[in-house]
Image (spheres, rainbow, N blue to C red):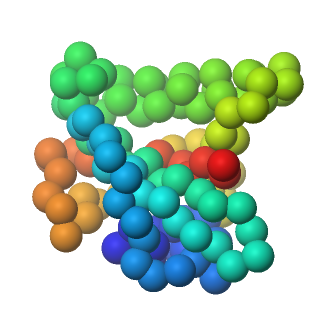
Amino acid sequence: EARDLAVEAFGLRGVSDPAEPLPSYDDQNWLLAVAGAPKYVLKIAAARAECRGFAGSAETLQQLSLENAAMRALHSAGVRVPVPLRDRYGDDVVRAPAPKAAPAPAGAEGAPAAAN
């Protein structure tokens, strides 16, 4: 389902199936291999997660947007960091249902994939 979300939300083509789960604390991270392109990491962040102080949906959205802005600023300054992608509509964070394969806390939200 992570692969399907990446294809639908970001328009990525040639994403291998299945996506490879990566270690994480509260969120779900998936490594996406794309034919002829860099690898991507899809982060599915859960609202009310301990790592974000049990913040609700609105606060989690703000925190994820701040994380993405920080990565973009570091990248612009020449620091080698993952660069967050915006979705097909230019949004910074994609709201997505919790994956069926691995239940997530209520209010789960997906963050943009980041190119490695």
Give the quarter of the image for residue 74: top right
Q: Is residue 115 left or right of residue 103?
A: right
**Which residue corresponds to the image point at 58% horizontal and 70% vertical from the top-left?**
33
Q: Nearer the viewer, residue 115 or 107?
A: 115
**Which residue corresponds to the image point at 65% horizontal and 40% vertical from the top-left?**
82
Question: Taking 31 as reference, is 114 above or below it?
Answer: above
Total numbered badges shown on the rendered structure: 0
Q: Can residue 94 be seen in this snapshot?
A: no
Give how far across and how far down residue 21 sits, in percent.
35, 60
Q: Can residue 20 be seen in this snapshot?
A: yes
Give the quarter of the image for residue 2: bottom left
**Which residue corresponds to the image point at 53% horizontal and 80% vertical from the top-left?**
16
Q: Is residue 70 left or right of residue 27?
A: right
Give how far across and how far down residue 96 sits, in percent.
36, 58
Question: Taking 63 as reference, is 12 above or below it?
Answer: below
Give the quarter of the image for residue 1: bottom left
**Which residue corresponds to the image point at 69% horizontal and 79% vertical from the top-left?**
35
Q: Nearer the viewer, residue 33 or 101?
A: 33
Q: Is residue 26 left or right of residue 8?
A: left
Q: Nearer the viewer, residue 101 or 24?
A: 24
Give how far across and how far down residue 114 sits, in percent.
61, 48
Give how far across and how far down residue 72 sits, in percent.
72, 30
